[in-house]
Image (cartoon, rainbow, N blue to C red):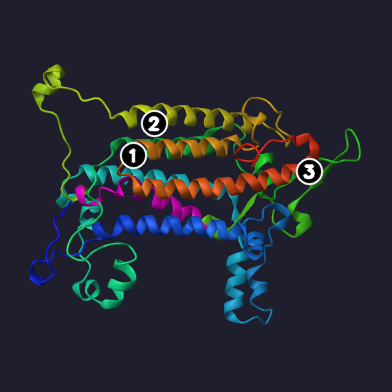
Amino acid sequence: MHRQIPLSCPSCTPPLLIADLLPPLTQSTLYTLSALALATQFTPFLRKRLLGYGKTIQTVDWKDNTKDGKPAKKRLLSWVFETTVPHSYFLHFYVLALSLMTASIVGILLPAHISPLKLLLSLEVPTAIAKDPWFINYVLHPLRIQAGYSSAGNGAVNWWVLLAVTAQVGRRLWEDSTLPGKAWDKSSRERMALGGEVTIPKAGGAGQEGKETEKEHGKTEGSRMPLPIYISGMLFYVLLCISSWADASRTILSYEAPLPSRSQLLHITSSPLSLPDVHILLSLPVFLLASGTQHDIHMYLSTLEKYTLPPAKSWFSWVMAPHYTMECVVYAALVGMGYGEGRCVVAAAVFVWTNLTLLGMRQRAWYGEKFGERMGNRGGTWPWL
């Protein structure tokens, strides 16, 4: 940790760098997004517009909406809350995340003078801003940054977390791109959740089926998701990538890749090999098991040609969305890998746990509405919840 320098020596005070601001700013943003997700769940106005899938999504043609005589601010709010995008845009999250993770790893390994990441982190906040009372009172103090030294970003570069996050987003990108029947507009199960055309058993008797399509509600064909959800998803994956190394933002500035010497490559036993820490040895198997299980669940869901109630066996005997459960376990393993220094990873995990728990509750309610007692006592993301 950097030594605190007396404020009586202004000329000796080190400059405030982007590397100093990034860790607390990342944490604060993620916790704020988690709080907003909870507020959305318990606020009917927001819940209807942001968590509404299928029949509850209310899309409005922007051209028509600008001619209804509403004030400009209300028209803009209507456009933001009521516009949806194709659910196939979900693929953008993983493309963005994998690109950023690859760029981050390359940026950490490159020398400082040619690394865009290190150049960005080394940028100084202008003195006029850094010493402005408003900036100090409303930015530095809330983020717990004390003038004169860096209070964050001094952790070690955790390559286990970096590689695990890269593997996770890479696997999700591969799944959504290649799994049979995984295309969002063809997956009736996902179309059920987000408003596409699905075949739903009716209560009138055996063999009776009814179709509910988005056309009945004035929507375009194909699964949709609210625009704010899409924007928040893109923001989250940017923050996730930053979280994987932000706790070492100061360390990265002087990080040099530990390249082995020629003798070590030829005689690897001449250099002692250090074993991973205990928390890595415990967390890595959990990460691999949860990731593999989630892949198996996605494989099973991708084979469903049309929507049916999942049979109460295996993971589906406890919850209706076990793929959400495994995602939560994956992020719990990431927290374990970053034990002691991964505060930003914890903030990212809290966001995931909050959102997937809420989505699981909503999915459980949908199953209960459509199938009643046939669903049993299964939970959403977690048993009995």
Disc 3, SS: helix
Mark 3–mark 1 Cα distance, whole angstroms, equals: 43 Å
Type of the residue with mark 3: Lys
**Residue 9: x percent and y percent?**
8, 70
Instruction: Please identify, in this view, whether the residue under mark 3 or under mark 2 is nearer the observer.
Output: 2
Q: Earlier in the sequence, mark 2 or mark 1?
A: 2
Which residue carries the number 2 mark?
Answer: 283
Front-most of 289 and 376? 376
Is residue 192 visible in the rendered image? The answer is no
Could you classify mark 2 by the number of other residues whose Cα lies within 10 Å: few (under 14), some (14-19), or many (20 or more)?
some
Point out which mark residue 339 bears. Answer: 1
Point out which mark residue 370 bears. Answer: 3
Q: Is residue 192 left or right of residue 135?
A: right
**Residue 77: x percent and y percent?**
59, 71
First to last magenta residue range:
231-251
**Residue 185: x percent and y percent?**
64, 44
Point out which mark residue 149 bears. Answer: none
**Marks 3 and 2 close (CB-CB < 8 Å):** no
Mark 2–mark 1 Cα distance, whole angstroms, equals: 10 Å
Could you classify mark 3 by the number of other residues whose Cα lies within 10 Å: few (under 14), some (14-19), or many (20 or more)?
some
Mark 3–mark 2 Cα distance, whole angstroms, equals: 38 Å
Front-most of 127 and 383? 383
**Marks 2 and 1 close (CB-CB < 8 Å):** yes
Q: Residue at x 8, y 66 (%)?
A: 12
